[in-house]
């Protein structure tokens, strides 16, 4: 049986590994000239680490990752609004790992069958019977997996009436600093703006920031970040000082409205092509990896309808939760921000852990239930 995976990012390579381990012949069509990842840091939550363990790559990932967990949320003055009971979180679910996206992709690329990778191939159109039209001609497969991101060509081909990605009202900056020591990690929530940071294994720090802006109006300069965040608590100014101008990435944040199905005949969507979500729960890549692990058993037992129901219910639930967190984090009205901050200060850590249970308790064995 042959599968064509369109897209060679994290979800596409994870899918290729999972299918090849289940006996499939796989081709991965990637439009870029190389299988590389442009980006910064990435949180791998315990659910994703279980999925990576099922793929046989967890050990290699952990060799390149820093095990840890975010400490909580602060006010721009530095006052804590919410603290995470990290010991209890680890006891219940396991530890979170921070990794650079390029390192994760490198491990997945090395684990995928080398003869399956086809860089420099742009997919133009896909049909429901498994035909793929691309820049090198046409290919046919028993199943086609669209892992080509939020602007998926596969989704446009098979779901032409699906709503377009929606701008959520805020932009994001991502960057990796030069090596610099930080103590506690976490996020800081202001009025319509947020800043977060986490240490990477080599001593550099992954930083991200958000701000309410009109679509397409933000810039990627350090001057803009210093203007917005330079007066916030330590170590945020020092992190900005340790960042090169060329390291700053800026992208407006979009999410994909709910699809009614991720499966159409021989075509299946995974990752952002199916359920692109805001980054507020750190689950975008994690859910793509879960998709990959859940798919082979569904194909093997001809249970794609069950796979579709389970993955849609789970990923759309998580996307909705991430959306709600983003709305809270981006509040800008002073009364609303004051109410939000007061609520966070009095909410016990145990309530936060209970809210995370549906997200972090996932296991590969229950993938399609």
Image (tube, rainbow, N blue to C red):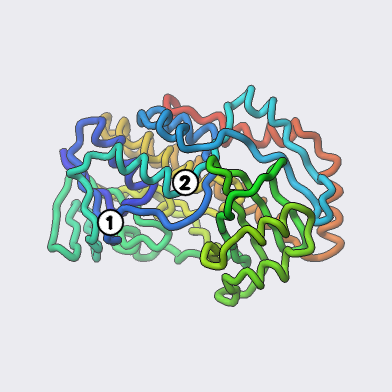
Q: Can residue 317 be seen in this view?
A: no
Q: Distance between the residues labelled 2 and 1?
A: 17 Å
Residue at the spot 42% in from the left edge and 43% down from the top edge: 104
Q: Is residue 254 left or right of residue 60?
A: right
Do tag 2 and tag 1 residues touch (Cβ < 8 Å)?
no
Residue at the spot 57% in from the left edge and 70% down from the top edge: 220
Q: Which badge, 2 or 1, is on the more N-terminal residue?
A: 1
Disc 1, SS: strand
Q: In this view, does 28 lie to the left or right of 66?
A: left
Tell me the quarter of the image containing the N terminus. top left
Q: Can residue 54 be seen in this view?
A: yes
Quarter of the rendering containing residue 302: top left
Task: Say above or below: 328 vs 295.
Answer: below
Disc 2, SS: helix
Q: In this view, does 112 lie to the left or right of 190?
A: left
Residue 285 — which label? Answer: 2
Residue at the spot 41% in from the left edge and 52% down from the top edge: 274
Q: How far across and down, in percent of the image, does residue 304 sit?
A: 32, 38
Q: How far across and down, in percent of the image, does residue 250 sit?
A: 55, 66
Q: How far across and down, in percent of the image, does residue 36 sit?
A: 35, 54
Name the residue tied to disc 1. Answer: 30
The residue carrying pointer 2 sits among few (fewer than 14), some (14 to 19) or many (20 or more) residues within 10 Å by Cα, namely many
């Amino acid at each position: 049986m042959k599968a064509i995976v369109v897209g060679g990012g994290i979800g596409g390579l994870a899918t290729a590994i999972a299918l090849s381990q289940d006996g499939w012949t796989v081709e991965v069509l990637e439009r870029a000239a190389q299988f590389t990842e442009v980006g910064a840091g990435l949180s791998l939550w315990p659910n994703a680490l279980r999925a990576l363990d099922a793929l046989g790559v967890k050990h290699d990932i952990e060799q390149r990752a820093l095990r840890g967990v975010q400490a909580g949320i602060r006010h721009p003055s530095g006052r804590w609004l919410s603290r995470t009971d990290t010991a209890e979180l680890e006891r219940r679910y396991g530890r979170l790992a921070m990794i650079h996206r390029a390192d994760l992709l490198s491990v997945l690329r090395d684990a995928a069958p080398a003869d399956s990778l086809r860089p420099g191939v742009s997919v133009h159109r896909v049909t429901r019977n498994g035909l793929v039209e691309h820049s090198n001609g046409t290919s046919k497969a028993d199943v086609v997996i669209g892992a080509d991101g939020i602007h998926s060509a596969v989704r446009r081909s098979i779901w032409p009436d699906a709503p377009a990605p929606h701008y959520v009202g805020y932009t994001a900056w991502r960057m990796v600093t030069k090596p610099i020591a930080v103590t506690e990690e976490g996020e800081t929530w202001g009025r319509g703006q947020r800043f977060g940071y986490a240490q990477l294994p080599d001593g550099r720090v992954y930083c991200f920031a958000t701000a309410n802006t009109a679509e397409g109006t933000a810039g990627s300069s350090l001057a803009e970040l210093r203007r917005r965040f330079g007066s916030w608590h330590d170590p945020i100014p020092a992190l900005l000082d340790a960042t090169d101008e060329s390291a700053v990435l800026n992208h407006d944040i979009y999410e994909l409205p709910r699809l009614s199905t991720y499966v159409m005949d021989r075509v299946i969507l995974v990752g952002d092509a199916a359920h692109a979500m805001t980054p507020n729960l750190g689950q975008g890549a994690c859910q793509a990896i879960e998709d990959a692990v859940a798919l082979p058993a569904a194909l093997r037992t001809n249970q794609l309808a069950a796979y579709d129901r389970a993955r849609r219910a789970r990923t759309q639930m998580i996307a909705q939760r991430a959306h709600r967190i983003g709305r809270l984090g981006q509040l800008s009205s002073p009364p609303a921000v004051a109410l939000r901050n007061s609520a966070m200060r009095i909410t016990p850590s145990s309530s936060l852990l209970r809210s995370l249970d549906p997200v972090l308790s996932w296991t590969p064995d229950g993938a399609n239930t």
